[in-house]
């Protein structure tokens, strides 16, 4: 919407305001720059989250959507640590989604299909999370919707978004990346020149894997929020470089002109996370729930795909990968050997049960997330 003012700035070149030499006309020129609009998006989403956070908390309390905590019978030690959090409002992810949507719609270009792909992924998976949270609250248990139903919904959203990326934006020529190419680190040329429909399948897997990994990370106050923040900032950098032909050529990364607009989306996401952290920091006044964690995962995955840095997500989202792998390792080990590798999975609970207090786990994982994000950005010359 803001970009429209730039495109039609001549309509505002009023003589009484100095015409094209006036300050107002010159200010409108700022709206063409991705960096300016990205900064505006981050500030807008942050302010909206802080302003409306209290209202969202009061509304969630009035609706009695308190977070159910696994009982002592289910996990005795975990209940001892987190039992006091029972009843804290959940579904706070609506604040993240709302502030993100409002900010992106104000600051991003509406004619960019990548922007809409990110929003569809965010809202689509956020809707699944909302259903899951509702099931937990309504039935007063911690299970929610079935795993099969989750995978089906995630796959459907991933299919729509994957088709948009693979076929809606897969242009070639003039140094522009084909969205169906498969690139691997340390290889300048594509490993597969055109994956065809397999590209869509790959994007579905990325969408499912990322959203589930973020969901598993959301177990402590502010943990997933802070990790998503650093990841979003890293992909703001990736998107800006991928969208600029000169920077992309210098750093040997894939270039797509539409990717630059994802900088605005990534910064809006960062602002939303920062604003939500205002209310979600320990001791949390509200939880994002699956509404927020699945939405965050969908947005991050689509940013990775759009900026052609989906492989780098393994590094940038290192904390999310750790959390997901810990669960996989734990399940496989217990089924095959009858033994657990970790005290409890996801791995943040392993450290809790090992004596780390909650704030220590959160802060140290934030530090790791920042390091992973910086390592991911450091690969720009390599990928």
Image (tube, helix red, strand yellow):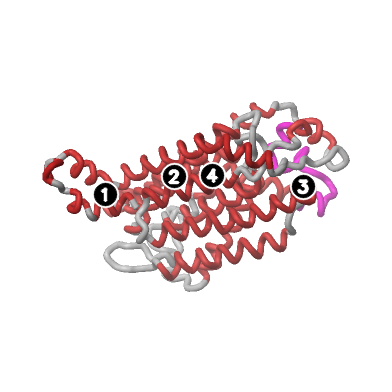
User: Where on the picture, by quarter, is residue 189?
Assistant: bottom left
Give the distance between the C-alpha atoms of the residues marked 4 and 1, in whole angstroms: 26 Å
CB-based contact (under 8 Å), mark 3 and mark 4: no
Q: Earlier in the sequence, mark 2 or mark 3?
A: 3
Q: Which residue is mark 4?
A: 96
Q: Position of residue 62 (x, y in %)?
A: 68, 40
Do labels 3 and 1 touch, CB within 8 Å? no
Spot occupied by residue 253 in the image (x, y as percentages of width and height): 36, 53
Q: Which badge, 2 or 4, is on the more N-terminal residue?
A: 4
- Horizontal side of 221 relative to 6 (left or right) equals right
* Residue 340 sits inside the magenta stretch: yes
Mark sitting earlier along the chain (3/4): 4
User: Which labelled disc corresponds to residue 130?
Assistant: none
Q: Is residue 382 visible?
A: no
Q: Tell me how far mark 3 sits from mark 1, CA to CA.
A: 47 Å
Nearer to me, 368 or 163: 163
Q: Secondary structure at mark 1?
A: helix
Residue at image point 60% right, 34% down? 280
Asked if residue 293 can be seen in this view, the reply is: yes
What residue is disc 3 on? 142
Q: Earlier in the sequence, mark 3 or mark 1?
A: 1
Task: Give the magenta-colored segment's residue range.
Answer: 331-353
Tell me how far mark 1 sits from mark 2, CA to CA.
17 Å
Please tell me whether residue 329 belongs to the stretch shown in magenta.
no
Residue nearer the viewer, 233 or 14: 14
Residue named by callout 2:
268
Mark 3 or mark 4, which is nearer to you?
4
Residue underneath mark 1: 32
């Amino acid at each position: 919407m803001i970009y429209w003012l730039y495109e039609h700035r001549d309509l505002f070149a009023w003589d009484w305001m100095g015409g094209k030499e006036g300050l107002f006309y010159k200010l409108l020129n700022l709206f063409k720059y991705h960096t300016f609009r990205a900064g505006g998006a981050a500030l807008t989403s942050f302010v909206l989250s802080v302003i409306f956070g209290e209202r969202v908390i009061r509304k969630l309390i009035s609706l009695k959507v308190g977070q159910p905590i696994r009982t002592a019978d289910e996990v005795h030690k975990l209940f001892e640590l987190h039992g006091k959090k029972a009843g804290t409002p959940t579904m706070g992810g609506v604040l993240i989604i709302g502030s993100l949507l409002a900010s992106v719609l104000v600051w991003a270009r509406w004619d960019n299909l990548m922007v809409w792909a990110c929003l569809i992924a965010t809202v689509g998976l956020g809707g699944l999370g909302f259903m899951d949270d509702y099931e937990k609250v309504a039935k007063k248990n911690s299970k929610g919707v079935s795993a099969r139903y989750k995978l089906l919904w995630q796959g459907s959203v991933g299919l729509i978004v994957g088709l948009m990326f693979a076929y809606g934006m897969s242009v070639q020529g003039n140094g522009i990346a084909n969205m169906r190419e498969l690139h691997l680190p340390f290889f300048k040329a594509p490993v597969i020149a055109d994956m065809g429909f397999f590209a869509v399948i790959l994007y579905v897997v990325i969408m499912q894997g990322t959203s589930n990994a973020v969901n598993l990370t959301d177990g402590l106050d502010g943990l997933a929020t802070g990790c998503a923040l650093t990841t979003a900032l890293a992909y703001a950098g990736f998107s800006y470089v991928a969208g600029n032909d000169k920077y992309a050529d210098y750093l040997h990364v894939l270039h797509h002109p539409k990717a630059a607009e994802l900088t605005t989306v990534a910064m809006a996401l960062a602002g939303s996370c920062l604003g939500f952290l205002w209310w979600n920091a320990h001791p949390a006044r509200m939880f994002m729930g699956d509404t927020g964690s699945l939405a965050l995962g969908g947005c991050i995955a689509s940013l990775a795909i759009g900026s052609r840095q989906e492989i780098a997500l393994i590094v940038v989202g290192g904390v999310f990968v750790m959390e997901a792998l810990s669960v996989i390792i734990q399940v496989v080990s217990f089924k095959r050997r009858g033994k657990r590798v970790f005290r409890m999975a996801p791995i943040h609970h392993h450290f809790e049960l090992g004596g780390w207090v909650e704030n220590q786990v959160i802060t140290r994982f934030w530090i790791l997330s920042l390091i992973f994000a910086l390592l991911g950005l450091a690969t720009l010359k390599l990928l």
